[in-house]
Image: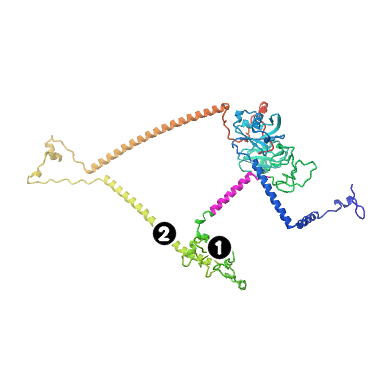
Amino acid sequence: MEVVRVEGEELEPDEFGEGSGWCEIKRHSKNQQQGQQQTAATSPTETSTAAGTAVKYNRKTARQVRQIARASRMPDLPTDDYKVVVRPRGGFNVSDYKMDRIYCCLRSAAEIGREAAEEDSICLNFKQNIVVLSTPSEDRAKRYGAISKLRIGEREFEASAYRAAPENTSKGLVRGISNDESPENIVKSLVTQRNPTVLHAKRMGNTDNVIVLFDGFYVPRYVYYGAMLVRCSLYRKHIDVCYGCGRLGHRADVCPNPNNKMCRGCGYSNPPQEHLCDPKCQLCGKGHLTGDRKCKAKYKIPYLVKRRQWERRTREEDAVVEAYGNGYNSSSTANYASQDRQLRREGRSASRGAIGGAGKSRSRSSARSRSRSLTGSRASKPRSKSKMRVAAGPGAMQPTGFEVSWADVAASPDGDGAAGRRDGVVVSGGGGPGPGRVSGDELERAIQQRLGPLEHTINELRRENALLRDEISKLKGGAAQRQQHKQQKRQEMFLEPQPLPPQPVPVEVNTVDDSSVETADEREDRPVSSKRAALDPERPTTEPRSTSYERLKKRIENIETSLDERFASQTEQINKMFTVVNNSVAKLAEQMTQAIAALTARMDDFEARPPPLAGRSLRATGKPYARPQQQQTPITDAETQHQQPSLSGDGLH
C-alpha cells in the first residue's frame, strides 16, 4: 500500500481518504477555467483560420460521402422479383475477376442451368464488394439463398447469402430483446394479427435489437411483442465502415484487402501495434475514430424522412401557388386596405427628405410637450410610413410598390389618376393630410362613397331581373293554358251532339217551269213518303240521310280502330325485337362461359406442365415475406433436407 507523506506527521490512507470526510472539489470548474483562458488567449486570426479549416474539412467530408453513396447506388431491378444478396468472404474481391467467371461461379454454387438462369438478373456492386441477384422464381431464389461457398478456379471462398427486403416496405427497430430469444420466437411474437403490417422480424447481429419489416411506407410508434406493447423506432442505415482495413464503402466481413490496413484515426497505412495518433473522424471531423459508435454523421437519412420532407415541401409550394398565384385576379380593395393597415402599423413616415415630402424632420420637443391624456389626438397615433414612386416615362422601370387600383382613381379629386399624384409623384398610404399626400381615412371614405351607388345599382338590377323572370314564367304558363283550352274545345266539339237541321217545308207552285221538273234521279234521291211507298211496292226503300254528327262519330271510331291496330302491330314488333335481343344475349353469355372454361382449362394445363426450356416463366406477384398460415402441415425429415434455410446475413438491406 502506497503511503503519502506530508509535512508534519505521517497519515495513513484511511485517514485522508473519502471515508474520512475528505473530498476533491472544483476540479471541473478549474478545467473549464483553464479551457476558457486558453480560448481567450487564442488570437482572432487563429480562430478564423480554425473555422475556415473546419468548413473546408466539412465540405471535403460531405463530398466524399456523396461519392461513396453514388458509387454504392444500384441500378433498378424488376420490382416483383425476389432479391438475394451474396456476400463473399475470405478476401474475395469482385473487381479482380471477370464478370463471366463470377456468373458461372454463382450458377455452379446454386446448381442452376444456363437456360433457367437467363431469366435472372445479376448485378455486381464493386464499392460494397457484394453481388445482388434478382429472379422471378421462388425456387431459384431459395437456391441462391443457400449459397455458402464460391469456387473460382482452384480457390474456394466462403460466402453468405440472404434474401433482401422487397419493394414498397419499410423497417423499424425494437430494442431490449434478450439474446435468449430464438429467431422463431421473435417471428411468432411480432408477426401476429395484432400487427397487421408486420411481414418479418430478425435480430440485428448479436445485439438485443430486432429489425422489423413493415408493409408500406409507415412505421408505427408501438408494436405488440406478444402481449407487450413495445416502442418501435425508425431504422436508420449507416455508411459502411470496414473495421478491418479502416476504409469506407464496405463492411469488415466482405473486406477485399484484409492485409492492407489503414488507421481509422489518422489514415496511416499499415500502422504498427504501438501506433498512437490524434484521431479525427473522416465523416464528422471530430476527435474520434472513423465510424465510432458515438459518431452521428455515419447514419443516413431514412427514405421515409426524405419522402415526408418532399411531400411537405410539395404541399407548401402548392399552398404558396394557390395563395399568390391568382394575385392579379384578387380584389384590389382588399389588397389596398391590407397594405394601408400594414403601413399604419410600421410607425414613422419614411417620406422625409423625398420628393413631395417634408424636407426636415419635425422637432420631437413639440410632440413631448403635448398632453398624453387626450385620446384620439395626433400625438397618440403613430405616423404611418408612406412609399413613393417617381412617375417615369412609359418605358422606364419603376421600383416594386403598390399598383394603382380603381380605389386610387376613385379617391383622386380630378379622377384622372391615382390618389395622391402630385408633381409626378405617386404617394401610396400617407402620414396625415398634407399638400402632397392623401391619408388612409380619406381613401376609405372615398371608397365607401363609391361603393354606395354601386351597391344600389346592383340591387336595382337584381330587382328588375326578378321581375323579368316572373313575367317570363307567367307568359310561359299562359301559353300552355291557352293551348290546353283549345284542345279541350276541340274535343268538346267532336263529342257533343250537333242540333239537327230543320226539315224542308214543301211549297205549292202554281206555274210549271223547267225548275220545277224533277228528273228520275232527283226523285230517287228524295225520301219517299209512307203512303207512296205503300202504293208503289216495287220502288226500293231508301234509308234516311245520316247527319253530320253520325258521320263525325263514325270517323272517330275509324281513327280509334286504326290507332289500336297500329299500336298492336308496333307492340308485337317490339316484343319480337326484345325476343331476338334476349336470344342473342343468351348466346353470347353461353359463348363467353365456354371461352372462360376453355381458358381456365388451358391455364391449369399450362401450370401443370413443367417449365419450358426457353422463355420466361410465370412469376407470382406476391411478396417473398408471406404471413405464415395458422395451420401448417408437418414437414418430414426427407423434406427438411431439401428445404433451404431462412433469411441469413448481417441484416436486412
- Residue depth check, mark 1 versus mark 2: number of the one nearer the observer: 1
Q: Is residue 282 above or below residue 146?
A: below
Q: Secondary structure at mark 1?
A: helix
Q: Can residue 504 be seen in this snapshot?
A: yes
Q: Can residue 235 be seen in this snapshot?
A: no
Residue assigned mark 1? 341
> Residue 158, image x and y in percent?
71, 32
Q: Is residue 116 above or below residue 291?
A: above
Q: Is residue 158 above or below residue 283?
A: above
Q: Nearer the viewer, residue 330 or 91?
A: 91
Residue density around tag 2, few if under 14, some if 14–19, many if 20 or more, within 10 Å: few
Q: Secondary structure at mark 2?
A: helix
Residue assigned mark 2? 461
**Which corner quadrant of the image does residue 84 belong to?**
top right
Tally of marks: 2
Q: Which segment is the magenta one?
A: 299-323
Three-letter code, disc 2: Leu
Q: Residue at x 88, y 50 (%)?
A: 14
Q: Nearer the viewer, residue 647 or 404?
A: 404
Furthest residue to the left? 511
Circles 1 and 2, Cβ within 8 Å, touching? The answer is no
Three-letter code, disc 1: Arg
> Residue 440, image x and y in percent?
53, 65
